[in-house]
Amino acid sequence: MKKQGILAMVLVIVLLSFPLVSCSNTGSRGTEDGASTPAEGTPEATKPASVKTNVFGWEVPEKTLEITAFNAGGNYAPSEEQKTGRENMEKYILENFNVKLTMQTTDGDGTEALNLALASNTYPEIIYWMGYNMVLKFKEQGKAQDLTPYMDTIGKDIKEKCAETYPLLLDDDGKLYYLPIEQGALMELPDYSAHIRYDEWQQIGSPDIKTPDDYYNALKKILEASPKTPNGDARYAMSLYNTMDYPVNFSGYWGLKRGWKIDDNGTFTNWAFTDEGKEMTRWFNQIYRDGLFDPDAFNNTFDDWKAKFSSEKVAGAIGGWWISWNAGHEVWQTLDPNTPEDKRYIQVSFKAPEAEAAYLTGKQKYGNGYTIITDKAKDVESIMKFIDFQATEKGLALFNWGIPNGVTSYKDPARQVKEWNIDENGNWSFDEEAKKQFVNETWDYNDEAVVGNGTYNFFSSSNRWSDGEYCIWGNQMWYSENKWKTIMMNNMKGTIYDATPMILRQKDENVTLTETAISDAWKQGWPTCVQSNSDEEFEANWTALQQAMTGAGIETYTRVMEENYQNNMEKLSK
Amino acid sequence: MQRKTEKLVPSGSQTGFDKFRKSLRTQRELWIISIPIILWVLLFAYYPMYGILMAFFDYTPGKEIFQCPFVGLKHFKSFLTNPAIWQLLRNTLAMSALSLTIGFIAPIIFALLLNEVGHLKIKKLVQTVSYLPHFISWVVTGSMVYMMLSSEGILNGMLLGLGLTDKAIPFLTQGSYYWTIYIIVNVWKGIGWSSIIYLSSISGVDDELYQAGAIDGLGRWGMAMHITLPSIAPTILILWILGIGGILNAGFDYHLIIGNSATQAYWDVIDTYTYRYGVQQGYYSMSTAVSLMKSVIGFALVVLTNWISKKTTDMSILY
Amino acid sequence: MRKVAYIKRSTGGMVFDILNGVFITIFTILVVYPFLNILAISFNDGIDAVRGGIYLWPRKFSLLNYEYVFSNRDLLRGAGVSVLRVVVGTVTGVLGSALLGYIVSVRNFYGRKFMRVLFLITMYFGGGLIPTYLLMLRLGFMNSFAVYWVPSIFSAFYMLLASSYIQNLPEALFESARIDGSSEMRIFFQIVVPLSIPMLACIAVYIGVGQWNSWFDVSLYSKDGKWDNLQIILYRLLNQATALQKMMEQQRVAEKMKTLQPQTVRAATTIVVVLPVIFIYPFFQKYFVSGITIGAVKG
């Protein structure tokens, strides 16, 4: 008896000393991790000596934890590299974590597949990449597990990463039934911007662009200098593509937030009923009346727009921050390696003179998709432990930068693809070669997929990490080392704000129908305004737009938005 | 089609049930074959029809239909009293009218014309090639339409080049062109495919009829009008009657891809509306209600048209 | 063409022939051109094609698109499944609908109208996606091959087509066979089928192509990918772009755009899926283009 008591004491001491050992070897980074397993030191921790902790600091369970997850993102169409990456990740997690991951997918629409799964009662332990309404459906039928009890214990890393947004994730009873994916935001990374070509802008004298009129005048000067493309086609000042909600996003230049004017009392006014919204529409209309607006602007798919843009038929652009790079120099430099370095677009920002700021990018921190643990899960605790690991920095690294230390490339078996490295003591660092390629924009995104990143992310945080340098997006670090990223960050400063309390997530049937009707109304009415041929026509079309919006129910919808905003602000202030 | 002939079984004195039992005896083999078929259709087609009940409840997937709140005719009312309904009906009927006239006749004419081509090899080649558009997905068709009709597209290029117009015509962004383009693209896509059935009917026409016609002095036009066309008339009638039943279907993928916000007032039809407001939001009750309305109207039209056809031309699909 | 033997040539006829020829030629161009355009794009380099402007000839030749399509590990298996679907589905569907069409054409069959109405209703009324899905689930058709052909053996539409054709066959043939003591199935296989070849060939083409092209049932019922066919592979490629449109967060969209396959790959996949049909089709075509004579079978 006494011998066994001493043996047990020795074991406990040995087990307790493990986290101390790994914590003291800091190396480059890696002090912060949620690796200390909560089971240590508790009476239940009389485990046999075979309990391992892997290099990531996670306690590997004895019995293989089997998790089947349904990826409800829909339209699942992986490339060969992505298929390989997923297999690699599954193998790696099984070997290192003793967790067997299986993914169910759907080729069609994710929501439809989820509805079928609900109706037929066939769904696995985890469903991820869900939309909020589907989460509510599952919750209402008792099919989503209540995760609140775990959030201060096993799931504390998740709660910590959600930081100040956490209260907004809870429902009205203060309970949490889901976990967010890509929660948070990089507050310095813009979503939307206007674009101008660097060399052309320099040619006209690099004028300051402070207001929308400055921007348009700059475009006009550029067109005067080179009115035709190298092929001899006519050039336009502006074109659009149909997957962008232009009036909602671009009323931001006139100071509106996501298409709403919010005053200090929390009263909302929709852009179609504000002077700012009208000014914005007038601005586009002016381009149209000058004949510099692409006649197919409201007809273009993104591919159509890209074809025009990469043929240099459009001088300016408004849309996502990346569109002018994707359709611009990335095409030109691939087709002709001798393309001059300055022949590429930069992002610019401007604001209407009376506007407070150019509220272009309203970041929402709720996340881009949600994960639930369903009622079919038998071991919720173990699953939560696994997901909590994904919230630690090593977990974020593993699931968003992929498998460390090198994976064989798909196209070139001699090459090893990796974004980061970790040694057997748990010290990790970002791979120097990878970093160079990201900074120089030579990173191969297709090949990257073999490291299996982004496949089984049940939780992730988009925020910058505690050290202020790293984040989950490989290409959003070290801006200062890349000339063009620096320009973008400098130009777009001040255009990004936190729109999280504004976002309306909970929608019942009436609200959804009203939303669709309003969307129908302005999607038809706004192009007509922009394409008016005279001031009288413009006024008539603008009034028609307002009438259509009113008929669609904008009043009720505005009240709903206000109420939602107020609720959220209250939740935050608690 | 069935012309009336005298019944071989004496009628009048026997009741319906008696006739049925007699038929079970005398036409036993036909019944032996029919019964499994009836069971098959009951299982695969009729059993799932309980889903129609969704239209009368506020159905949520995951619950049984009867566990959901009963709402009676709410979904029907909300759809029919929707202010957009007139535009939807107008668009739907306009485009399906075009399909039932121009779109219907085109493959017939094509089949007749192709039948007149002397060279067998050319005939076969053209026929094979003619249905290629059927295989091109709507997505790819959409890019093609864009390539042809956008302001920088081929057609505008030709018109500008020939001096027929001084500014590009906004074919794709002006609603008044929409229906015309719709029927042209649909004819292009479907003409070869739909003509297959007519060509096969034409080739089933007994050669002796043509010989007899030649003896009677019919020329090519006469043969086409008095022999070929009447011989395929039954097929034409069936397809047209069935087509009438689909009068409330007026394209779907086409509009989602080729339609845009500038032309929406012309392309929004019942199906696209239901998709936006029903299916995409997961409101199965609403889409089931609309679907039920379409079914009832469509079926009623088929029965009505068939009855008219029986009265006037003695041809029917039901007898 | 058989008619030529009996008809005198006339000037009216010659004019018509010329006009017909012109019309057919224009028509052929309009129909073939888009196809040649897709073919050209499929042989063009992906990035170069982004700029548009490719019409009949690739501007920058490249086989990479086809390489990408054929590098798909599941392609060969998918092709096999597609072929199997076409063969099994066509044989069962044609025979099923033809048999049904025959039964509802028998002149004094008591159940004739009943069967017709029974099937006609199914053309317009249906329970929708969820009940059908649940039925297939309960029948054990998930991840099975049976789900592709068993629910389509008998079709109301083809029943009507077949029966309209069979009704025009001479009744005397059937009567005399019945008097000779022949069973209905024998009449069906030995008289009805040979005489209905043009119609059966047409139905075979419609069903066969339908089986070749279908992808929606694959996406619903082939969950573990075992019974994926060629068309679903194409559908996935075409849908990479659709998935993108639903994403709002710009950083995600930006990342995904970098790995999106260009439209040239989509063009190549379209060609790969269509070509087999074009090659097989002439075998069926001869049955309803050159036609047969009833008289030949009579003997």
Image (spheres, grey):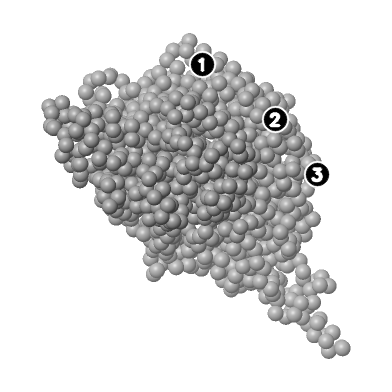
Badge 3 crowding class, 10 Å Cα cut-off, few under 14, some 14 to 19, many 20 or more, is few
Callout 2 amino acid:
Leu
Q: Earlier in the sequence, mark 3 or mark 1?
A: 3
Q: Quadrant of residue A206?
A: top left
The residue positioned 51% from the left and 28% from the top of the image is B307
A301, B259: nearer the viewer:
B259
Tell me residue C121's x, y (percent): 56, 39
Question: The N terminus of chain A appears in which quarter of the rendering?
Answer: bottom right
Q: Residue furthest top?
A: A536
In the displayed structure image, the side of residue A395 where residue C210 appears, left or right:
left
Q: Which residue corresponds to mark 1?
A: A541
In the displayed structure image, the side of residue A486 where residue B38 appears, left or right:
right
The alpha-carbon separation of the residues under discs 3 and 2 comes to 35 Å
In this rendering, the answer to whether A476 lies above or below B72 is: below
Tell me residue A252's x, y (percent): 56, 29
Q: Chain of mark 2?
A: B
Q: Are marks 1 and 2 on the same chain?
A: no
Q: Quick check: can you spot residue C47?
A: no
The alpha-carbon separation of the residues under discs 1 and 2 comes to 37 Å
Callout 3 amino acid:
Asp
Q: Secondary structure at mark 3?
A: loop
Label ID, residue B73: 2
The residue positioned 39% from the left and 36% from the top of the image is B235
The alpha-carbon separation of the residues under discs 3 and 1 comes to 46 Å
Label ID, residue A173: 3
